[in-house]
Image: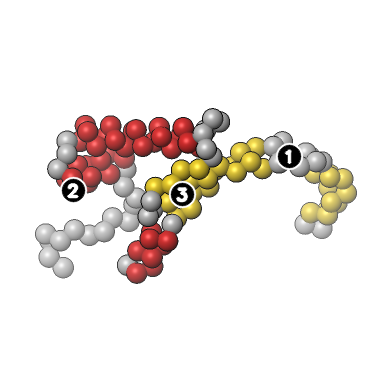
Amino acid sequence: MASSEKKPSPKSLSKSQIILELAETTSLSKKDVGTVVDALGELIKKSVGKKGTGAFILPGLFKVVKRRIPAKPAQKGVKVLGVIRDLPAKPARNDVKIRPLKALKDSALNS
């Protein structure tokens, strides 16, 4: 392996590394790319937030979905690991899932 070749990094990229890579690829300034990344984050928050649609799709990459999980009542006398216990009630909550779309799955499997 020649010393000029880049080895793949075992760690995921940081935000500044992502901005630098995008700036080099698109020939935009790092400040412009940073603004776009921050705006994309705000758009996702707004879409998944209280008044949003509950979903955000970045075509070809991923889908962010908010799901409402209903409250669960308390349970008495449940056998957990061989011991009878009382389970407390759980309040209703929102859960956010990020699902990869087909194009991202295919590229991950083919590489």
Classify residue 8 by image quadrant.
bottom left
Query: How far across and how far down the image is residue 41, in percent?
Result: 39, 36
Asked if residue 55 is positioned above or below residue 100 in the image, the reply reads: above
Depth order, front residue of 40/8: 40
Q: Residue at x 31, y 40 (%)?
A: 15
The disc at residue 25 is 2
What residue sits right under mark 3 in the picture? Answer: 63
Depth order, front residue of 47/34: 47
Q: Amino acid at mark 1?
A: Ala
Q: Residue at x 24, y 37 (%)?
A: 33
Q: Secondary structure at mark 2?
A: helix
Label 3 neighbour load within 10 Å: few <14, some 14-19, many 20+: some
Nearest to the eye among marks 2 and 3: give it: 3
Asked if labels 1 and 3 touch by Cβ distance under 8 angstroms, the answer is: no
| Quadrant in which the C terminus appears | bottom left
Q: Amino acid at mark 2?
A: Thr
Q: Secondary structure at mark 1?
A: loop
Label 1 neighbour load within 10 Å: few <14, some 14-19, many 20+: few
| Quadrant in which the N terminus appears | bottom left
Label 2 neighbour load within 10 Å: few <14, some 14-19, many 20+: few
Q: Amino acid at mark 3?
A: Lys
Asked if residue 94 is positioned above or below residue 100 in the image, the reply reads: above
The disc at residue 71 is 1
Q: Secondary structure at mark 3?
A: strand
